[in-house]
Image (cartoon, helix red, strand yellow):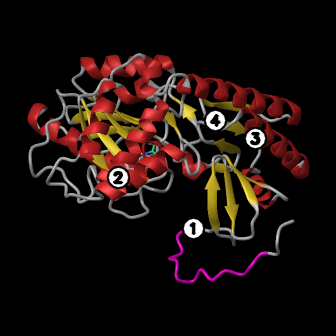
Amino acid sequence: MNKPAQAIDTQAVMFITKRPDLIMIEGRGSWLTDNNGKRYLDFLQGWAVNCLGHSNPGMIEALNAQAKKLINSSPAFYNEPMLGLSNLLIANSCFNKVFFANSGAEANEGAIKLARKWGQLNKSGAFEIITFDHSFHGRTLATMSASGKPGWDTMFAPQVAGFPKADLNDLDSVKKLVNDKTVAVMIEPVQGEGGVIPASAEFMSELRKFTKENNILLIVDEVQAGCGRTGTLFAYQHYSIDPDIMTLGKGIGGGVPLAALLATDAVACFVPGDQGGTYNGNPLMTAVGMSVIEQLLAPGFLGGVKKKGELLKSELLAIAAEFGLEGERGEGLLRALMLGKDIGGKLVDLARERNPEGLLINSPKPNLLRFMPALNVSDDEIRQMGAMLRELLKQVA
Ligand SMILES: *Cc1c(COP(=O)(O)O)cnc(C)c1O
């Protein structure tokens, strides 16, 4: 039995988004518990952040051990976890150099600066970076300007210049924007906030071929799709291409603020003074990141993500058929259910308010639901989510 909800005082928190009248107190695996003792099956996981679920034992151990040893030396010195995590990422990708940051937006700012610097050195000051309609790259001024979210072009005008927008999966729309100022193309392998829309295999390989032939850098923003989410360690690995720059965030920290900018030797052209940040390579955060990546690389783990992705896919397809919905799409454990009508927001609220156990899902567009469970979610929990969703869809029918 749930206790009656307690009134909570939230007036000191700056209002930036509507939040439900509850406080999350603790989490274990795929479950969160609020201040009234109610449990929620969490298929949000901090927006694809907690890739190993809540309170992962390996992460806790790494955090505790590092906290006892060294929390922060200073960005002026190397530290052990910074070196360890850099080496781990290099050994398992096509990149040679890593810079750590604290958020996805900050990693993308670094990618934009690196591409512009490379353009200054190699392409007579070319600085334009082609991005895509409906893309999402963060909430700093430059990354908002890079994003293709409707309305963001005027929200905090004037924009940072130099981000023309092409259409995803349409190479001609990219070619039309190319001129002698073009230095890079930046793309999410799966558009997350845009509604879980994967770049097609054909488009990605043609885009890589075209950019290479025209001396244009390819930047993949894997803040949401990277770190095992799609069933490979990095999403670009589905396409058999080698990008020049990649950014990571969200999953790399498993819940702690950590992000990364990776580049090949040919492109990593920063010199002292170009890039920095007080917390870059912070040992406490990179120690946790090491634990996360090591667990993702453990034998069988990524294969398990693929299998669970297939199970989630078949569950969503079955639900779509049962309720006459449009279908589903996505890659691995980043998936969307296309509802065919604008009931996403209503379903999200009903799911959370459901009793005795709530369900946490998200609706980036009114006509679809997005699912981003922990990568170690159990088969039972996927089926449980399906059962809860069926019940809610009956309610709104
Ligand atoms: C979330 C996200 C970002 C921004 O990351 P923050 O850590 O919120 O700054 C950038 N790119 C993509 C693809 C994202 O999903």
Q: In the rendered structure, find residue 66 and report the number of the disc placed on it.
A: 2
Q: Is residue 32 left or right of residue 13?
A: right
Q: Mark 2 or mark 4: which comes first in sequence?
A: 2
Can residue 145 be seen? no
C-alpha distance separating marks 4 and 3? 13 Å
Which range is magenta?
5-16
In the structure shown, which secondary structural element does the residue marked by tag 3 occupy?
A: loop
Coordinates of residue 48 in the picture (x, y in percent): 55, 45
Q: Amino acid at mark 1?
A: Thr
Marks 4,3: beta carbons within 8 A:
no
Say if 163 sits above or below 23 in the image.
above
Prevailing secondary structure class for the magenta stretch in the rendered image: loop
Residue 101: in magenta span = no
Quadrant the N terminus occupies: bottom right
Task: Estimate the x, y position of residue 339 in percent, counting from the top left.
Answer: 76, 41
Q: CA distance from mark 3 to mark 1?
A: 24 Å
Residue wearing tag 1: 17
Nearest to viewer (mark 2 / mark 1): 2
**Camera-side mark, 3 or 1:** 1
Earlier-in-chain disc, 4 versus 1: 1
The disc labelled 4 sits on which kind of residue?
Arg
Q: Is residue 303 left or right of residue 293?
A: right
Q: Earlier in the sequence, mark 2 or mark 1?
A: 1
Q: Nearer the viewer, residue 181 or 313?
A: 313
Which element carries disc 1, helix, strand or loop? loop
Q: Residues within 10 Å of mark 2 (few under 14, many from 20)?
A: many
Q: Are marks 2 and 1 in contact (CB under 8 Å)?
A: no
Mark 2 belongs to which amino acid?
Answer: Gln
